Image: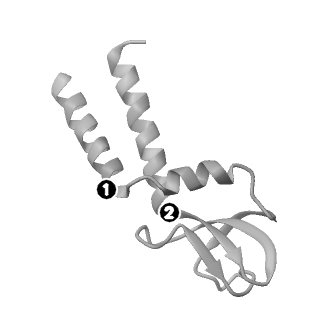
């Protein structure tokens, strides 16, 4: 692989991490062992959300997947959620502008 393809792949991975960090969250319910992976609309809100009742169609989150006790890949999502949001954006911008200068 040449450098341009490698930089493009890294940029795509960083964009994916920014999307997951900004617009996805894990919803836990206080009275139920169900855990949900959901889309959220505020990128600066918490990624692990504690909710009182099960989410319905009027909720502020769109549920993608739900499971008892733990969703598949929850530890990976939690690791991504622990990344610094601004560091990801700065890394993307630095790589993007470096890539544009080399063109």
Q: Residues within 10 Å of mark 1 (few under 14, many from 20)?
A: few
Residue displayed at 42% across by 45% down? 15
Left or right of 6 on screen, residue 90? left
Look at the picture and state if 81 lies above or below 8. below
Residue displayed at 44% across by 52% down? 83
Front-most of residues 18 and 5: 18
The mark that comes first in sequence, 1 or 2, is 2
Q: Residues within 10 Å of mark 2 (few under 14, many from 20)?
A: some
What number of labels is visible?
2
- Where is residue 52? Give x, y as percent: 69, 87
Look at the picture and state if 87 lies above or below 2. below
Query: Label for residue 86?
Result: 1
- Residue labelled with disc 2: 23
Left or right of 40 on screen, residue 55? right
Left or right of 34 on screen, residue 6? left
| The image quarter in which residue 3 lies | top left
- Where is residue 10? Give x, y as percent: 41, 32
The residue at the far top in this view is: 1
Residue displayed at 38% across by 36% down? 11
Say what secondary structure mark 2 lies in.
helix
Residue displayed at 43% across by 12% down? 1
- Where is residue 75? Give x, y as percent: 64, 51
Callouts 1 and 2 close, C-beta under 8 Å = no
Left or right of 18 on screen, residue 86? left
Say what secondary structure mark 1 lies in.
helix
- Where is residue 90? Give x, y as percent: 26, 48
Look at the picture and state if 23 lies above or below 83. below
Q: Quadrant of the C terminus?
A: top left
């Amino acid at each position: 692989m040449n450098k341009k393809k490698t930089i493009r792949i890294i940029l795509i991975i960083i964009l994916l991490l920014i999307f997951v960090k900004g617009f996805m969250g894990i919803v836990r319910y206080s009275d139920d062992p169900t855990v949900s992976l959901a889309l959220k609309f505020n990128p600066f809100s918490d990624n692990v959300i504690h909710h009182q009742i099960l989410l319905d169609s009027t909720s502020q989150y769109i549920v993608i997947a739900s499971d008892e006790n733990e969703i598949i890949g929850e530890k990976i999502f939690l690791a991504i959620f622990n990344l610094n949001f601004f560091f990801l954006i700065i890394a993307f911008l630095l790589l993007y502008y470096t890539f544009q200068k080399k063109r």
